[in-house]
Image (cartoon, rainbow, N blue to C red):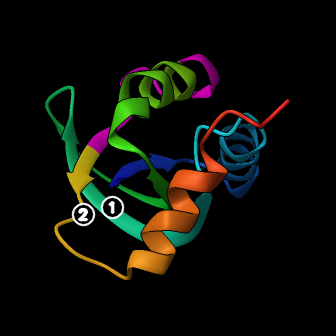
Amino acid sequence: MIVILTACGSAEDADRIAAALVEERLAACVQIVPVRSVYRWQGRIERAGEWQLQIKTRAALADAVEARIKALHGYELPEIVALPVAAGSSDYIGWVHAETAEPSR
């Protein structure tokens, strides 16, 4: 299991990306958290209110999640950072795997 982080400039964009990832079974759960970001962009220090997405998924889906974020995101260079989950509830991790698996036919 991994957690992928990205941030959006509006709550609407964050919700749209989160819903697409869950509906397409690329993520089991996406939490949307308001954050305040300070960063350097094109030589200037910027400050912005953003909405961070914490995307719970399987490591095997990292490339597909990245491609989908890039396709849906409004930023020229969206943050896409994958963090490994070193430990956690086996029940929760099992649920993440089940929710991101291909549905049985």
Say left or right for 75 vs 62: right
Q: Which residues are magenta?
A: 71-81
Question: SS at mark 2?
Answer: loop
- Is residue 52 depicted above or below 21 in this figure? below
Please name the residue shown 49% across and 54% down the image.
Answer: 55
Which residue does the image show at 57% across and 28% down from the upper left? 73
Q: Position of residue 69 (x, y in %)?
A: 53, 29
Query: Is residue 72 or residue 85 the one in the foreground?
Result: 85
- Report crowding for label 2: few under 14, some 14 to 19, many 20 or more residues within 10 A (C-alpha): few
Measured Cα–Cα span from mark 1 to mark 2: 24 Å
In which quadrant of the rendered view does residue 28 lie?
bottom right
Residue under pointer 2: 85
Q: Give amino acid for label 2.
A: Val
Numbered disc 1: secondary structure: strand
- Location of mark 1 (residue): 37
Circle nearer the viewer, 1 or 2: 2
Residue at image point 74% right, 37% down: 20
